[in-house]
Amino acid sequence: MEDCVLAELNGTLIDGLAFCAKTYAVFERLRSAPDGPDRLRLRATSAHKRLLEELLPICRYVQTYYRPGRYISVRWLDGSQSFDAELHQKGDYVDKGYYPALAYLEATSAMHANEHWIWKLLSQGKAAFAPDGISKPRGEPVQSKPIVFTNTEHVGSFVPIVLAQIAQKAEISYPPNTSLVVQCSLNSLYTPDDWNLLTQEVRRQLPSHSFRDILMFNGTTEMATSIS
């Protein structure tokens, strides 16, 4: 039944801001269901997973770039195609050739390999610290211990995670004018300076790719930066 809540969004061309409003309404519907927050956290069904890993990142992209002269409509496709959504654009900037009338969007997530253990610990009402402090001894429960980062060590260790995800997506064949939005589940608390350093280092070491642009964002803090 939960998968049906996405049906009205699938394959339908919707104005970008209306798409965001509909997506947030779906989020609230799932969140208010019995055990809703935990089911969202654990990506309990394909609807929860697609909402968090595709639809909300698409919304973040739209809210970053929708503006006078660039009006974006979205057709999200729940299928096996290489991209997640079509972007139909119009307005003066499009007429002047700054942006294509038809573009595509692919969403991906960059996170520590232990991130899923944090979701499970939190759903059990237990404390969870940075994913680097997670361990799973054989035959014992998952353990999360505080760890200490020196200066910007946490940023330096997260840069390769983002780069690896971008490199993986760069190997896929996409239609022309495809953009990539990278949702970052950060490995510690980040200040704005930490985030700026992260995006600078990713931009500096960016692998070869054919994306029209790449947007990095963190859903918790709402920090977002275009790196390409």
Image: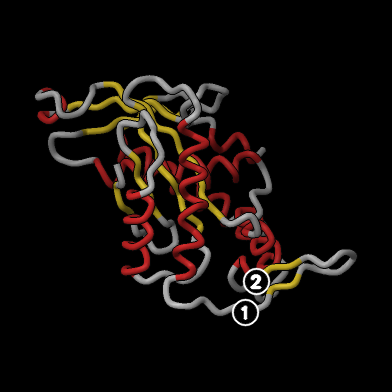
Chain-order first, disc 2 or disc 1: 2
Indicate the position of residue 8 as horizontal and vertical percent values: 49, 31
Tell me: 50 left or right of 89: right
Q: Residue at x 69, y 61 (%)?
A: 117
Q: In whole angstroms, how far apart are the C-alphas of marks 2 and 1?
A: 6 Å
Indicate the position of residue 80 as horizontal and vertical percent values: 57, 23
Residues marked 2 and 1 touching at CB (< 8 Å) = yes
Report the quarter where the N terminus lies: top right
Helix, strand or loop for disc 2: helix
Q: Nearer the viewer, residue 185 or 13?
A: 185
Query: Which mark, residue 133?
Result: 2
Q: Quadrant of residue 138?
A: bottom right
Helix, strand or loop for disc 1: loop
Q: Nearer the viewer, residue 14 or 182?
A: 182
Q: What residue type is labelled 1?
A: Pro
Tell me: 197 left or right of 112: left
Indicate the position of residue 64 as horizontal and vertical percent values: 28, 47
Q: Which amino acid does label 2 sit on?
A: Gly
Label 1: how many Cα within 10 Å (few below 14, some 14–19, many 20+): few
Indicate the position of residue 176 as horizontal and vertical percent values: 34, 20
Query: Which mark, residue 146?
Result: 1
